[in-house]
Image (cartoon, helix red, strand yellow):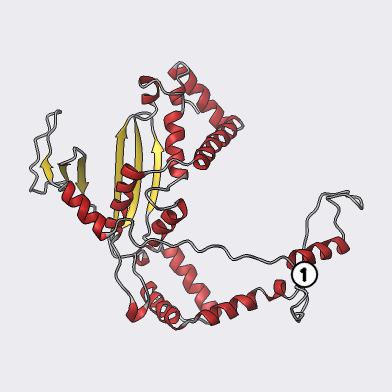
């Protein structure tokens, strides 16, 4: 999906590395095709054997495993000036003993996280479509902009309204190849903290908590993150002085495919995937305590870093003077 977006510098580096190693130079499409064919021939036993060979320098230290050939090198860093008996003291004997004891511990495999290919099933989609039939309505404006019909495309922007009241503006960019950008703007932002009687910084911390979280509906944060990775979605949630802004960057092609080679099954497009994310954020977002903690820690770290930076501190002082110490404009 991004093969035509590789810069000239990256292409040149790839070509030089290919020639230096005696490899075959291939275009992204050729490389993808060869990789898909290779993956379709791999078996689980071959993958497990390769993993075993890669980890042999660790597994050979177990008591019931045969010793591996070659030299095993271990490097450790410890505080200077440690004395024997100290918890921070390290010499050859204690290092070897620690490594050996660690290799005797059984390692439990991590639980596989099932990655959803779609966040909304066909049955759910049909149900909500029947309950709330989608419809376009004409765009009505109060600033003098002429009203736009619901059944006609206008240039440079098509401005309409959905039947649920959401305003939609669509514009075409011929410079973007099979990529789309969606921005959702919700009025409010830091300005709403004072008007609604909220605690200072609550809107900013809340929007960052949404960015740090991501669980909604029946899906966990890990599943949603993997869904976005599989469909090449980028999501960013920010809070400005006037609004909360959610930005999405997504491919318009089928990227959530399943299988390889002749067994490939087309998944949903990136456009459908990003609209599923939008729907779940609006109707089923889950607030998580650990995400809120990470959000607070992020702002705390940013503020402390700003106070130690001459340029940042100077900017903060100027904003204090210009805004009369209005906390909505400060860190």
Image coordinates of residue 242 in percent, x first then y, are 34, 29
Q: Residue at x 49, y 20 (%)?
A: 320
Q: Where on the picture, by quarter, is residue 255?
A: bottom left
- Which of these two is toward me, 243 or 117? 117
Residue at 54% over, 26% down: 314
Query: In the depicted view, which residue is nearer to us: 14 or 158?
Result: 158
| Position in image of residue 159 (x %, y %) | 16, 42
Left or right, 141 with reference to 66 = left
For residue 279, above or below residue 202: below
Name the spot of residue 287 as percent of width and height, x first: 44, 40
Whether residue 176 is visible to the viewer of this picture, yes or no, is: no
What is the crowding at mark 1: few (fewer than 14 residues within 10 Å), some, or many (at least 20)? Answer: few
Vertically, is 105 above or below 52?
above
301 above or below 81?
above
Give the residue furthest to the right.
84
Q: 156 and 97: which one is in front? A: 97
Residue ranking furthest to the top? 324
Quadrant for residue 207, please give it.
Answer: top left
Instruction: Identify the residue at the far bottom of this view.
Output: 41
In this image, 187 relative to 106: left or right?
left
Where does the N terminus fall, quadrant-wise?
Answer: bottom left
Label 1 secondary element:
loop
- The residue positioned 31% from the left and 73% from the top of the image is 265
Is residue 26 shown above or below 150?
below
In the picture of the structure, the residue carrying the numbered disc 1 is: 73
Question: Which residue is more in the foreground, 60 or 108?
Answer: 108
How many marks the image carries: the answer is: 1
Give the residue displayed 52% in from the left and 73% down from the top.
17
Q: Give x and y (percent) for residue 273.
A: 31, 56
Q: Is residue 26 left or right of residue 59?
A: left
């Amino acid at each position: 999906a991004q093969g035509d977006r590789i810069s000239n510098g990256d292409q040149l580096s790839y070509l030089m590395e290919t020639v230096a190693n005696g490899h075959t130079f291939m275009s992204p499409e050729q490389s993808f095709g060869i990789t898909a064919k290779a993956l379709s021939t791999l078996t689980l036993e071959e993958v497990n054997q390769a993993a075993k060979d890669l980890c042999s320098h660790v597994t050979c230290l177990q008591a019931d495993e045969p010793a591996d050939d070659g030299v095993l090198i271990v490097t450790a860093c410890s505080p200077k000036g440690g004395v024997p008996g100290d918890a921070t003291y390290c010499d050859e004997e204690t290092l070897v003993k620690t490594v050996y004891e660690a290799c005797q511990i059984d390692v439990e495999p991590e639980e596989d996280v099932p990655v959803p290919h779609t966040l909304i099933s066909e049955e759910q989609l049909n149900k909500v479509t029947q309950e709330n039939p989608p419809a376009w309505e004409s765009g009505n404006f109060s600033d003098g902009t002429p009203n736009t019909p619901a059944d006609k495309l206008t240039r440079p922007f098509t401005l309409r309204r959905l039947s649920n009241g959401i305003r939609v503006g669509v514009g075409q960019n011929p410079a973007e190849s099979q990529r789309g950008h969606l921005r959702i703007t919700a009025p409010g932002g830091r300005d709403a903290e004072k008007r609604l009687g909220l605690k200072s910084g609550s809107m900013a911390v809340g929007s960052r908590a949404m960015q740090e979280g991501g669980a909604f509906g029946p899906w966990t944060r890990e599943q949603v993150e993997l869904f976005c990775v599989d469909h090449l979605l980028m999501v960013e949630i920010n809070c400005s002085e006037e609004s909360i802004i959610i930005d999405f960057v997504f491919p318009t092609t089928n990227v959530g495919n399943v299988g390889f080679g002749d067994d490939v099954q087309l998944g949903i497009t990136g456009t459908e995937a990003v609209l599923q994310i939008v729907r779940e954020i609006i109707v089923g977002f889950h607030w998580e305590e650990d995400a809120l903690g990470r959000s607070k820690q992020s702002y705390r770290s940013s503020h402390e870093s700003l106070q130690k930076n001459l340029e940042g501190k100077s900017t903060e002082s100027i904003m204090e003077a210009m805004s009369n110490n209005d906390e909505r404009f400060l860190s």
